[in-house]
Amino acid sequence: MNIRTRFFLFLIPATFFSHIFIATCMYQTWSLEVQKQFEKRFSAALEEKDALSTSELAQALDKDFFLKTLRVIPNIPPAFHRIHFKTSYYHETVFAYLPPTKMRSAIQVDLAAKELFSELKSGIFWTATAALMSMGISLCGLFLATRKITAPIEDLKKAALAIAAGDYGQNISVKGPKEIQELSNTLSVMSECLYENSQRHKESLLEKPLASYEETSARHLQKMMFSMRAKDSNSDKISIKTLALHSLQPKGLLLELCDSPGAPLQLSLFEANQAGLAGMYDLLTNHKTNQESFPQISASLDARSELFSYQTKQFPTPFLWSFREKTFFPLKEDCTKVDCGDCIFLYTPSLFSLYKTEKEMQKHLGKVLKFFAEEGLDPLSKMLYKEIHFFAKKQDFDEDIHLLFFQIL
């Protein structure tokens, strides 16, 4: 149901009942005036004959009016001292009640009033005709008014649908009330702005070098190889988090985690030999068949004996943060005793290059761990990211940094 139909469904009944009410008021006013003139005429005729007897009065009234009956009314109330009229539309008769005089008693006069009722019927006809004509004119006016309002709205609706379909830049000019014109101007401005933005986006896509697409793809692939694998890992021995800062040429880092029931947890990190998509592809296809050709670190955690061990090749030594002592402890390559709540950090050589020495790195990261290690891994990872990112930006360091840390459960 469109807006024009709703407008008519609301206004037509309102117009109809308002005209019926006005016509009824007009007819009642007019009929009362006609009846009042009849009664005035009767009263004027009676003034000359009021002193006559009943029979003489009947003869005299029959000359001016068509008298049907005239009869005496016994037991008239004392307050009945003026003429009363009662109209019967069905019998087309006016009943006049005359008070008593010295010459006669109170009487009732029945007068035929065809002329009066003819005028009333004529009034009904002309009142109904005027009401119908007025209603027709009003409906025509309503149609024109709604057309003047709804037609611009339909045009604006079509223009909005065209913009939604991608037809930007069109000049929307709609005639109508001031508010409709302001709305059309607003849509025109929006359409022009969308057109300009789309043109700029197309130009930026054309100007964007192929290397940027490769960089985006490499970052996405790196996220799948490292962060997403850590996020999707399910283990009841550790809770794991990752941290990554990417350069313009991301260098692939692959995470593999094996947690079999009843066996120690096995975790391995492999780093690509070269940056970019080519290095990541080589890492994904050859890390299983030719593991020795990639920088790597492998770690093992035995939950029963609470022993941690690792093996590394071209990777820096991991470090352990003691939850109880709130400090770093060195890790032995063969086995190290760990406790529940301790955090172990594995990282790429680039992090070691950023801080120059292991002592400097532990001092810098230890400030964050002292305050946020007890808050859980989520706030800890966010604060570590902010701290490392700020320090790398300050040092103008532009290499990939990958950090993986997990907490013993």
Image (cartoon, rainbow, N blue to C red):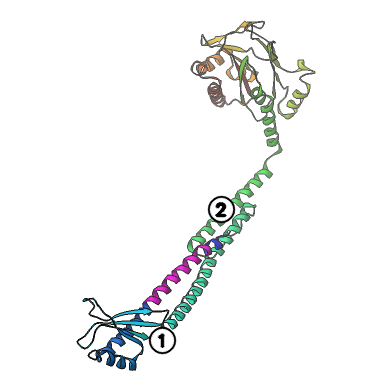
Where residue 85 sits in the image (x, y, percent)? 31, 80
Do tag 1 and tag 2 residues touch (Cβ < 8 Å)? no
Going by the numbered disc 1, the residue's amino acid type is: Lys
* In this view, 29 is above or below 38: above
Where residue 34 sits in the image (x, y, percent)? 36, 82
The residue carrying mark 1 is 114
The residue carrying mark 2 is 190
In the displayed image of the protein, which residue is found farthest to the right? 289
Quarter of the view holding residue 392: top right
Q: Is residue 11 magenta?
A: yes
Prevailing secondary structure class for the magenta stretch in the rendered image: helix
Q: Is residue 224 left or right of residue 90?
A: right
Number of numbered labels in the structure image: 2
Quarter of the view holding residue 51: bottom left
Which stretch is magenta?
8-28
- Residue 373 numbered mark, or none: none
Q: Secondary structure at mark 2?
A: helix
At horizontal 63% and vertical 5% (from top left) the residue drawn is: 305
* In this view, 292 is above or below 399: above
Q: Residues within 10 Å of mark 1 (few under 14, many from 20)?
A: some
Where residue 193 sits in the image (x, y, percent)? 57, 52
In the displayed image of the protein, which residue is found farthest to the front? 74
Name the front one of labels 1 and 2: 1
The CA span between labels 1 and 2 is 74 Å
Q: Is residue 106 left or right of residue 235?
A: left
Q: Point out the image quarter for the N terminus.
A: bottom right
Which one is in front, 405 or 244? Answer: 405
* In this view, 307 is above or below 215: above
At horizontal 40% and vertical 77% (from top left) the residue drawn is: 27
At horizontal 60% and vertical 48% (from top left) the residue drawn is: 197
